[in-house]
Image: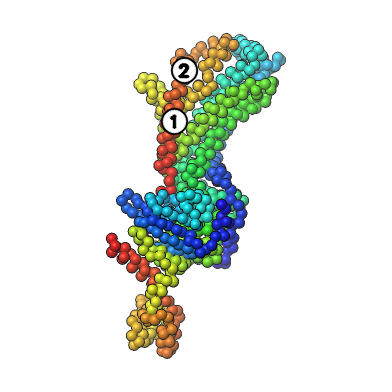
Amino acid sequence: MSGTDLREESFAEPVIEVSNLTKTFGVQKALDDICLSVPAGAIGLLGPNGAGKTTFMKCLLQLLPSDGGTARLLSRDLKKEGREIRKLVGYTPEEDCHVPGMVGCEYVTYCAQLCGLPFRAARQRAHEMLDFVGMGQERYRKVETYSTGMKQRLKLAQAIVHDPKIVFLDEPTNGLDPRGQVQVLDLIQSLWRRQGITVVLSSHLLHDVDRICDRIIVIARGRVLVHDRLEALKARRKGVVEVVMPDGAGDLVGACSERGWPAELLPNGRVRVEHEGESLNALLSLMRGRGLTPIELIPSPNALEEVFVKALEMSHESN
Amino acid sequence: MSQIDVHYRHYDGGYRGIWMRRCTIASAGLRSCLGNRWMRYLIALSWSGALAMVGVIFLLGQLLIEDSIVFTWLEELGPQLQNFAGALVTWLIEHPEISVRTTYNLLFYFFSTMISGLSFIAVAMVIPHLITRDLSSNAIVIYASKAVGRLDYLLGKLGTVLVVLCLTWFLPLIAAWFFGNLLAPDWGFFWHSRTALLKVFLYVGGSILFLGLVSLGVSAVSSKEKTCVGLWLFIWLFGNALVPLSMATKPWLKFFSFSYNLDQVALSVFRLNSELELAQANVPVLGRMLRGISSRTEEAWANPEIQGALIGLSIMILISAWIVWIKVKPE
């Protein structure tokens, strides 16, 4: 079946369906009876190092055989249609991977051909994708000579060159400088928001996931601890807000304390307020009444971090 | 310009089938191999061997032309060669089908075993381009994440080594057959040499397939190029060293040499002994010319140890398949 047929399928259908997925390495359970049903979107796969994120992705890509359970990707059975499904799946591994001796554009063209694109179309798309990831003339250099940042961009280009429906990205910002991180995250974000390509982003960097994902899966010790929309996770922490003030931060702390809302001045100059309200209206009224004008309000600022830490604690307790 | 402003276009074209994807892997490997200039020199050397064979066939054909300059040369080279040519001409004229077949069988045997060594060297040069470099650069993960399975990958890599071996071994012989016959004075040479050609297909085709399968295993042994190439040279040269050693110790040791085993297959396929006997019966001077050959060699030609050779080759293929199965995985 061609990729265009699959593209017409509804977004409402789950793109990843996993039932009792298990994988062990010796006595260590890397994946412990995982059950999931995930719709299309920008999905963040969070967990500490060694949690099982990469193993989970590799099992879905059939890079590793699972020991038990079933998995469906894009509503298709992995075991029966693995090779054809991979036409519609992109993957950027965490480690450096390239075909030796090839220059950048040749490598990306080759990757497109491996997914079935005819040579001319593959070459054209390779150049388009290299433009998309922001690579210039360095595409004509051998991949072995690339810097870490270039390699990350190249990995992203090879993952999307065949226009997949879902892309698995394993720590795609590793080794990038802050500017490079922002650029790569922008590109990844645009894949889902502008192109409708489902992104599964595996990372231990909460900031990356918070920035671009709308759905979170937290994995630890091979188990799924949390799976929910990011909004829903943040809603659990309603009532906490960080306020960026141009000046008068101390006045805000005093005003909140008078109102009975715990408030503290953070080392970064922001004021953290626990206002106990469903919305920010009460806090805004208070500030207006005191003549305080904020630069920025950040609701539920550390929701993801707290969920993550709480999930890990739960995991430790259960063991 | 922000990078995300660069246009992303969805692909709405068609996809090619799995055989084209396998060919893509094979052609990428081939490009990588031919990028090595020593490989190109080696191929050129093989084709110069083919050119020599064309020359021999051409000279053979010239014997059928009465006033050919070849007779003048033979007169200058001595009476023994002149007698040889005279007897050969008589045989060619009286029994063209048998004589051409026999002559071609002998020619193909000697040329195919002679240039086989070049193919063994070619394998040593191809091995790093097969699986070794993919293991060291982690490219194996990239292949596994694309729309090709492990079998597709291996078939592609096998395609690479088969094409290289065709360039160094199989195609030169086929070209020599074709152009040699094209230069012959009688079109009947094409027809009369058909069984010799079939034997080339059988022996060289089988040998190439064997070498291809074994080279995959050797290539998968390690991610270090020197280790894999060293292993191949060890298997080849140490195997050859075992052949004389086996005569004084255990006779089965010689079957550890793949070149010995392939030679036994060649002797069996081309029926060297019976063809030589037939040739000696019709060209008596040939018997005198071959008198210098040792009785041990004659015995070896007469009784090729085909069963032991086939078992030896099969065991090597099985070991190679086992190594590939264990080592060629993304993890």
Place of residue B110 in the rendered image (x, y in percent of width and height, measured from the top left): 54, 22
- Report whether residue A153 is seen: no
| Horizontal side of residue B210 vs A277, given as left or right | right
Amino acid type assigned to the residue bearing label 2 in the image: Asn
Q: Which residue is mark 2?
A: B303
Disc nearer the start of the sequence (2/1): 2
Q: Amino acid at mark 1?
A: Ser
Image quarter of the C terminus of chain A: bottom left
* Left or right of B162 in this view: A238: left
| Residue B136 sits above or below residue A212 on the image | above
Please name the residue shown 43% across and 76% down the image: A298
The kind of secondary structure element at disc 2 is loop
The x and y percentages for residue A310 are 33, 68
Expressed as whole percent of the image width and height from the top left, the position of residue A103 reads 54, 50
Quote the CA–CA distance across marks 2 and 1. Answer: 20 Å
Q: Nearer the viewer, residue A200 or A60?
A: A60
**Vertical placement of B122 versus A134: above or below?**
above
